[in-house]
Image (tube, grey):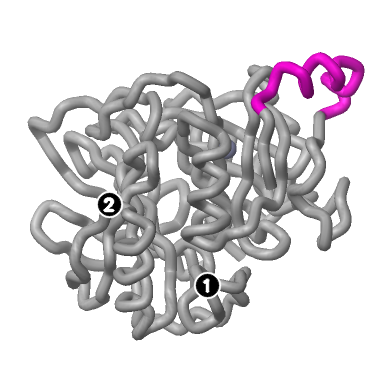
């Protein structure tokens, strides 16, 4: 069988205050902190992973909270919107919830025949809740306030904004196995049949759009999903054959990674499903301990002292 990307694995964004980020995602949006670790390339910074109960691929939104970071600029050459799948009929609940919590949000609208509600997180990151027409049987993480009839089920889609659609589209179709589905104005929808969920990428073409500046409230990269690290490495060859630079295989403890910049400027990652987030904490305790990769374990007390206190 042809090796195709299985949709989105995770999306990583930049936040400011760690506590504010934690409160927004776990309390207002109602997703679970499944891993509290540090940025492996900058261990003085947290790396938070939010997702469903076990941090299933396709549900994971991750943040580097850098205290006092400037606000970035959302623009071309980056992922510009994150789409979560929510149950049909739940947008009114969310509208009211956002109003009460003073979350900046739009009015329910329609795109590609699906209702959605857009909102911003406290750092200005753009997200949408999409009441999808497609069947989505994923089990959501629920809280006392956000129950099954409204809870997010993981990603629906991601939006990439670029100056020219074709070069980015070519990576999706020729390397990842996506197909062009349909178009609304300057928004082109691509979908993979290798998975039923988190399987949509929209490319927005803005020929004269300002380039984005990667800082607070912007997306850092989008990770696409390979079943395991062996299949992941097949994509490495395909990316190289297309004349693009790609990193060596990197061990991220919870998955393996490859990174490359697609021609439109968006930083892409390919990440494996294995080994997953339950390798070093029991499911019931995910996200409650500070987990450090072995190379930083010897510096634990210094790192703990350095990191801002997080009230969970
Ligand atoms: Zn990543």
Query: Does label 2 point to a residue whose CB lies under 8 Å from ligand 1?
Result: no
Q: Is residue 181 left or right of residue 61?
A: left
**Image quadrant where residue 161 sits:** top left
Residue bounds of the magenta highlight: 293-308
Element at badge 1? loop
Q: Residue furthest front?
A: 100
Q: Does 292 lie within the magenta span?
A: no
Percent coordinates x, y for residue 11 in the rendering: 50, 45
Whether residue 28 is situated above or below residue 174 in the rendered picture: below
Residue at point 37% right, 67% down?
97
- Specify which label sits upstream in the sequence, 1 or 2: 2
Work out whether residue 250 or residue 74 is closer to the camera in this orientation and state it.
74
Can residue 238 be seen at all in this image of the molecule?
no
**Image quadrant where residue 220 sits:** top left
Work out whether residue 26 or residue 113 is closer to the camera in this orientation and state it.
26
Query: Which residue bears the numbered disc 1?
Result: 146
Percent coordinates x, y for residue 82 in the rendering: 38, 52
User: Magenta-highlighted stretch: main secondary structure?
Assistant: helix
Whether residue 56 is situated above or below residue 244 in the rendered picture: below
Work out whether residue 252 or residue 151 is closer to the camera in this orientation and state it.
151
Percent coordinates x, y for residue 16 in the rendering: 46, 29
Quarter in which the N terminus is drawn: bottom right
Work out whether residue 84 or residue 247 is closer to the camera in this orientation and state it.
84
Image disc number at residue 104: 2
Percent coordinates x, y for residue 29 in the rendering: 48, 60
Name the quarter showing ligand 1: top right
Element at badge 2? loop
Residue at point 74% right, 48% down?
287
């Amino acid at each position: 069988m042809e090796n195709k990307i299985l949709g989105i694995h995770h999306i990583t964004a930049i936040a400011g205050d760690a506590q504010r980020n934690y409160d927004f995602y776990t309390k207002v949006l109602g997703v679970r902190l499944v891993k509290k670790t540090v940025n492996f390339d900058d261990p003085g910074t947290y790396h938070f992973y939010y997702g469903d109960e076990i941090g299933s691929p396709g549900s994971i939104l991750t943040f580097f909270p850098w205290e006092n970071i400037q606000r970035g600029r959302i623009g071309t050459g980056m992922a510009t919107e994150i789409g979560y799948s929510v149950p049909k009929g739940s947008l009114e609940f969310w509208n009211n919830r956002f109003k009460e919590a003073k979350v900046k949000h739009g009015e329910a609208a329609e795109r590609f025949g699906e209702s959605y509600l857009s909102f911003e997180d406290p750092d200005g990151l753009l997200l949408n809740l999409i009441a999808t027409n497609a069947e989505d049987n994923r089990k959501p993480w629920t809280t006392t306030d956000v129950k099954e009839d409204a809870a997010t089920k993981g990603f629906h889609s991601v939006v990439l904004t670029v100056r020219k659609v074709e070069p980015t589209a070519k990576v999706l179709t020729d390397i990842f196995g996506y197909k062009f589905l349909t178009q609304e104005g300057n928004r082109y929808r691509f979908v993979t049949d290798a998975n039923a969920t988190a399987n949509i990428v929209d490319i927005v073409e803005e020929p004269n759009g300002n380039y984005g500046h990667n800082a607070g409230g912007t997306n850092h990269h989008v990770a696409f999903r390979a079943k395991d690290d062996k299949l992941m490495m097949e994509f490495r060859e395909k990316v190289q054959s297309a004349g693009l630079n790609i990193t060596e295989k990197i061990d991220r403890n919870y998955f393996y990674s490859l990174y490359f910049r697609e021609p439109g400027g968006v930083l892409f990652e390919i990440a494996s499903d294995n080994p997953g987030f339950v390798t070093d904490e029991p499911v019931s305790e995910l996200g409650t301990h500070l987990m450090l990769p072995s190379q930083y374990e010897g510096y634990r007390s210094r790192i703990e002292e350095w990191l801002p206190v997080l009230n969970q």
